[in-house]
Image (cartoon, grey):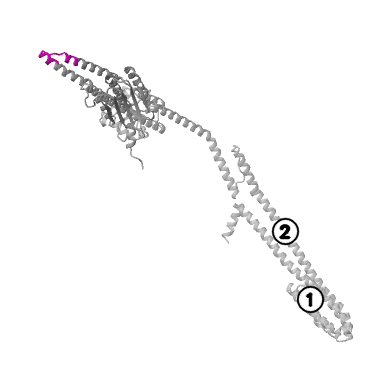
Amino acid sequence: MHRFFPSLTQGLRNSVLVRTGLTMSVLALLSLASIVISTLIAEDISGRANAVNVSGSLRMLSFRTLTEVQQPAKRLQALDTMKIFERRLLGLERFIVAKSASDSPSVIAVHSVLQRWNADIRRLEQDAAMGDSAAVQQMTHEIPDFVEQIDHVVRLIEEELESKARSLRVIQLGLLACIVLISLFTIWMLRWQLVLPLAHLLEAAKTVSQGSFSARVTHVTSDELGQLGRAFNTMVEEIASMYAHLADKVEEKTQELTRTNQSLELLYRISQQLSASDLTLDKVQAILREVENELELGHSMICISENGQMPAHTVTGNLTADEAHALCDRPDCGQCFARAETSLTEQAHRRPMVAVPLGDGDQLRGIMPVLLKADTALPREKARIIETVGHHVSNALLNMRRTEQKHRLAVLEERSVIARELHDSIAQSLSYLRIQVTRLEKCLEQNGDARAITDELKQGLAGAYRELRELIVTFRLRIDERGFNVALQETIAEFSAKLGFPIQLNSSLSGIVLSGNEEMHVIRIIREALSNIERHAEAKSASVHIAIDALHAVTVRITDDGKGFHPHKTPTSHFGVNIMHDRSQILDGRFEIETAPGTGTVVTLQFLPQKVRQIIHEPRST
């Protein structure tokens, strides 16, 4: 109990729910009490009304007995009436004693009536019923007084009945008044502690929703709505504080986005410039100078270590002599390369410069030292931009190196082709002429006829001259941006003019793309075959047919209706067939010549393009 009452008191003080529940409980108890009391009193009243009826019957039975004893014929019936009277009187006495207090007037009065009945009236009525005239005469005087005494009992019962009814009305009115007062108190309490605080809270919420953060809730007690009001006021204050700083945050985010956009634009321009095909070291230096100006950095340079050898050599840079001397104070460059292994943010704390690593993969091949200005910090955003620039520069340098290597390989390949062409044509012709000169010398020493030898020398020189001109034309042959088909059509037009009749062309190479090397070898094989037709075939028609099958294999077929030749009896001074065969081997293809004297010639080249071979040989992903 000691724990319950402080908890109840605290609940009444701090909780609207507890207060409302308590008032509703009191109302329920009062209603229940009203029902119970009304039921009890109604039951008691109901019994007393029956007692009044019994009392009235006693009066009637008294006068009935008097009437019956006065009539001799009914005197025996009077005895039965007396029994009924006595039974009802005893029942009335028991009821009044049970319902009323022992000292109540009704109990005293009914006892008096019963006592008089037992002492006088019953004996007197019995005597009168037996025919005693004196008893009848006395009964005539006693019965009215006895009935008056019974009426007194009835009046007392009625008075008690009216008292009970008045008590019931008073109790009902009292309980009703309590219920009404408690209901009014509950309504008042709910209005002031629930409805009005909720209305104020709703109004304040609407005010805040319209952008005004000056609204506050006044109901800040310790109950639920008071706690809600304090929380609402705290929330509004925090929102007002956040809203007050919102403009600054928006401005800050706007500036941050602007800087980010500028950084992205810078990186985009740099990536575009560094990915150009005509990139040079001077352009790389110009790009680095642009980065220095945009990021407010000092001068920079690029150092490359070839095959891990130290010291590294400077590729490009705009450091002054004093800056270079102060930066490169160690000949092995180990300090800068070791510095490049840490993050730029850590390097920025150890001024005066940061070293950006350059290279491919995990092997460090170079660094890009960037000087920092004394009054300029290096935020993380700038550090990320510098790292990205270093990555782009690294890729650009690697691409430049690969391009240079490809150029060297192309030059070497071209020189090899020239050497092979000279060896297969001019060198062979010169060897043949040298043999003829030796024969001529021996013929002159022996005073023989040298005309046949000189004629062969003239023919050999003419052939060598033609071979030389053909080689010059071949080496000058280029396939420009117009593509392979345009170069092929120009070749067909050139030899059509030389042969004096149009060469038929049927090409379906538009659906496949050959590499530049493959296009050049195909053009040269076609030119070599057409050149042989021009010099040796004496043909009247020729055609070039290029087809692609379902497996993307390319078939080139050059036909003519000339005189043909024996494929195993090629003159020693003719090298065109060997050259075409060698080119077909370079293409990893199959080369065939179908000819015979007087039947014309069919030259066939069939190969699979390199790109198709790469796709076929690539491992399939599972």
The answer to which of 165 and 617 lies nearer the viewer is 617
Q: Can residue 353 be seen in this view?
A: no
Q: Can residue 93 be seen in this view?
A: yes
Q: Where is residue 416 in the image (x, y as percent from the top left)?
A: 25, 25
Magenta stretch secondary structure, dominant = helix
Q: Position of residue 353 (x, y in %)?
A: 34, 29
The residue type indicated by label 2 comes to Leu
Q: Which of the image's four quarters has the C terminus?
A: top left
- The magenta span reads 440-456
Disc with the residue nearer the chain's start (1 vs 2): 1
The answer to which of 406 and 600 lies nearer the viewer is 600
Report whether 260 appears left or right of 25: left
Q: Does the magenta stretch include residue 466?
A: no
Q: Which residue lies furthest to the left in this view?
A: 446
Label ID, residue 176: 2
Foreground mark, 1 or 2, reads: 2
Report whether 8 appears left or right of 69: left
Label ID, residue 318: none
The answer to which of 215 and 44 lies nearer the viewer is 44
Classed neighbour count for the residue bearing mark 2: other residues with Cα under 10 Å, few (<14), some (14–19), many (≥20)? some
Label ID, residue 110: 1
Q: Which of the image's four quarters has the N terminus?
A: bottom right
Query: How much space separates mark 1 and mark 2, taking CA atoms?
Result: 37 Å
The residue type indicated by label 1 comes to Val
The answer to which of 512 and 251 lies nearer the viewer is 512
Residue at figure coordinates x 71%, y 56% from the top left = 180
Q: Position of residue 340 (x, y in %)?
A: 32, 33
Query: In the displayed structure, would residue 55 be above or below residue 334?
Result: below
Query: In the displayed structure, would residue 49 be above or below residue 531?
Result: below
